[in-house]
Image: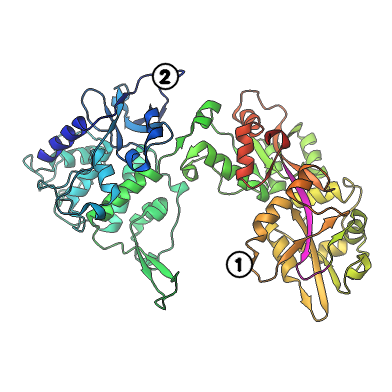
Amino acid sequence: MKRFIHLLVCALVAAAMVLPAGAEPGGALWTREEAGGAYVTVRVPFPEGEGMSWGQTRYLGVRYAGTGEPVALTSDYKAGYLFATVPARDAGRPLEVFQGERFDWTDIQHQNEPMSANTLYIRGVLHGDGEGRLNLEQVLTRAEAFSLLVRLLDLEEGGDPGYRDVAPSDWYYGAVSAARAAGLAAADETFRPNDSVSRAEFNTMVYRAFRSVGWADPERGEAQDYADSAGIPEWALEAYQTLGSLSISTIRELDENGESEPEVERLAQPGQGVTRREAVGLIDSALDRLPVYPTQTAIDRGFDRAMPVIDGSTSTYPYTDALYSALFHNAGRHPGLPASHSKSHASYERLIRGEVDVLFAATKASIELEEQAKAAGVELEYIPIAYDAMVFFTNEENPAQGLTIGQLQDIYVRNAYDNWSQVGGPDARLMPYCRNTDSGSHALMEEMILDHGALSLSGDILQGNMSTAMSTALTDVAAALETSPAGYAIGYSVYYYYLTAETMMVDVTDNRLHLLAIDGVAPSDETIADGSYPLSACNYIVLRADTPEDSPARRLAEFMVSPEGQEVVTRAGFGALQQAKG
């Protein structure tokens, strides 16, 4: 109790900067009911924070105005705001931002003090013992662990918890009562307050605590590889899966030969007692990395309320990833972020069937897909959002620098050549690779080389050298290199995917590639943007034409051609439209 009183006094006295959470500029406070309805998140304005250093913002917190009680579930400072999550019973209480202070723990030197300890101290979660000691290396007891989580969740007492070994005179009685009432503590006959808590147990406790708020979704987990994963109890697996890299673990170096980057392995050591240092680190990291908060852009566009269901081709997934990163803090935990795209053909089919709202597409639908849409009574709407292009590439060792569109038609339609010398190159075998006919790359081939479907790929090429994935379109060509006698392959993809994937080729094969000029013009950011490269194209947002005007999908289309949306295009690694470059 002495410690808690000190916390409140220092918070009140040290609060040099206070901003009541009244109406935000232009309207009321932004709020969100969390999953399950037990908690409400409030965005609290604090524009003064923009002039503060990172170290200073780490001491900011949110408290209830008037009483000075800190809100434990408070975010770090985020561009003029802090987010505070309070029990639904307290959703109407006024909030304010305050400047806390670092506490001088008596058993630790300041330079060795984890910042997370003071973050949780300011938020009222961490108290230390009666002598002001943090006891970082001490193993946590069950009474201490549940006390931390009860403060974190701001749980109310629920009367006699019903344990034979917990009495009203015990310092932890209130916390145990609250934990039992909230279902965090099991309905056993004994509580065992002084038993040590293992890593697996504390990981699971923290996971369940954050899941009760609505922030820990097993489907958004980040599974980690542990050398001793077989030892993780089955009851703790979901917690480890969901917390992912946040889970308490030990990193052990395997390579001791003095190299700058030795090999390491991660150990869960689930049965090992969890220290206070580890417990503090896990709670602070989970508080920072599990909640998903909207940016101002997301709020302005209504994406905090609803995101459209997005799909697309493999090459356009960077759009989706960059979009969510621009709209949300901790975007990887957002339930709407797809883990991947369904590939071009399948994504169009899903849009036609109404299973998704919008596509990021590297090409318009193929003739076959347009016929499917027509048969389903669906009209597709294409909105250009970025520049891209179809590109052809060959082995780096190949001295050939370019081809004409006519030569490409001879190669892919008529299978007319078997030697590069026949198209102005070296005396070397020519090996053409193609993509599967339901790929986005083939749709580009169909549009640009096959005369909008009037021509067909050679059956010999389709049966012999087909790459069934965007990544293997590059690796197949790279691996096809022949040296005695010489032989070089040719393949195709889209420009910005090629730039990204080709830089990773060394991890797969030592063989590299180079792009070919077409009709005398080499592909580049400039030649694609100005249209001088003959196979220039656009990437698109694709909607069903009957998509309602104020729907999330329609708002996304409008956003992607706005200056902010074009910044997303650039961050995704694609060529922004000229109108957004000025």
Give the camera-side residue of 122 and 310. 122
Give the camera-side residue of 396 and 276. 396
Q: Which residue is mark 2?
A: 28
Query: Residue 232, located in which quarter of the rendered image?
Result: bottom left
Is 225 located above or below residue 6 in the figure? below
Number of dots carrying numbers: 2
Counting from the top left corner in percent of width and height, residue 385 is at 70, 37
Q: Residues within 10 Å of mark 2 (few under 14, many from 20)?
A: few
* Helix, strand or loop status at disc 1: helix
Counting from the top left corner in percent of width and height, residue 149 is at 25, 43
- Which residue: 84% across, 52% down? 521
* Helix, strand or loop status at disc 2: loop
Secondary structure, magenta segment, majority class:
strand
Mark 2 to mark 1 CA distance (whole Å): 52 Å
Is 301 located above or below residue 450 in the figure? above
Is 483 located above or below residue 524 in the figure? below
**499 in the magenta segment:** no
Q: Are marks 2 and 1 in contact (CB under 8 Å)?
A: no
Q: Amino acid at mark 2?
A: Ala
Q: Residue furthest bottom?
A: 484
What is the number of the mark on residue 507? 1
